[in-house]
Image (tube, rainbow, N blue to C red):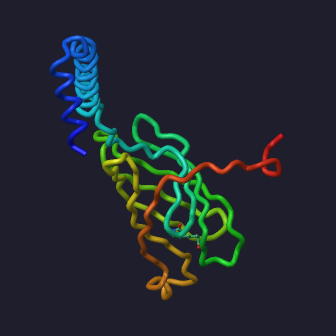
Amino acid sequence: MALPALGYILTFRDSPALRQLLLPAMMMMMRSIGFILVLALAGATLRPPLSKECSLIGLWQNDLGSEMKVMGVSSTGYFFGTYLTSVTSSDKPISESPIHGSQQMGDQEQLTFGFTVAWSFSDSTTVFVGQCFVDDKGKETLQTMWLLRKKADSRQDNWKATLVGTNVFTRAKYKSPGRAGRVL
Ligand code: BTN
């Protein structure tokens, strides 16, 4: 097996014509490999770091399947949108409810925020507080905690009127409403 290779090396060594033909090609190949390596290294080091900044604007879905749409944030940090809960303690049919909140404007990285949902289909009100976290791949997660105030029938029932919990929101994809849901 090694003999033909040895024969080839000897022929190459001893044949100046062959050497003259192959040497420039080999040098060009090595130069191209070097160039590709430099480009790859530059690409790896010069690539801008992924943004760690968080924007609340957009559609979010939480671990219960509820959807929150943040439509705008003002320069002072006020934001508004809609909330469609997937669960309810009320016996009324669920419908979309407005949200109003405010976020910290100084540092857009891992910003904190709070918002209120005055439910349109029940007597309850929920307040959420939370923080946005961005991972190494740029994925945003909203870690929240909420207080849900139900309407107590009397002061004596006040003690059982507040629920507390947590929700984690991640970005949801917009679903096309399709033909039926479109406003013509
Ligand atoms: C009600 O049941 O009176 C109104 C709906 C409450 C829904 C709560 S708010 C906290 C939790 N997170 C959700 O997405 N939905 C429930």
Q: Is residue 122 left or right of residue 33?
A: right
Most distant residue in the bottom direction: 156
Q: Is residue 100 left or right of residue 97?
A: left
Image quarter for ligand 1 equals bottom right
Q: Quadrant of the C terminus?
A: top right
* Residue appearing at x 42%, y 75% in the figure: 164
Q: Is residue 176 left or right of residue 183?
A: left
118 to 13, vertically: above or below: below
Name the foreground residue: 23 vs 74. Answer: 23
Count of numbered circles on the image: 0
Name the foreground residue: 166 vs 61. Answer: 61
125 to 172, vertically: above or below: below
* Residue appearing at x 65%, y 59% in the figure: 96
Q: Quadrant of the N terminus?
A: top left
Name the foreground residue: 164 vs 179. Answer: 179
Residue 3, percent from left and from top: 21, 40
Q: Quadrant of residue 13?
A: top left
Q: Is residue 168 left or right of residue 179?
A: left
* Residue appearing at x 37%, y 46% in the figure: 138
Residue 78, percent from left and from top: 45, 43
Residue 6, percent from left and from top: 18, 35
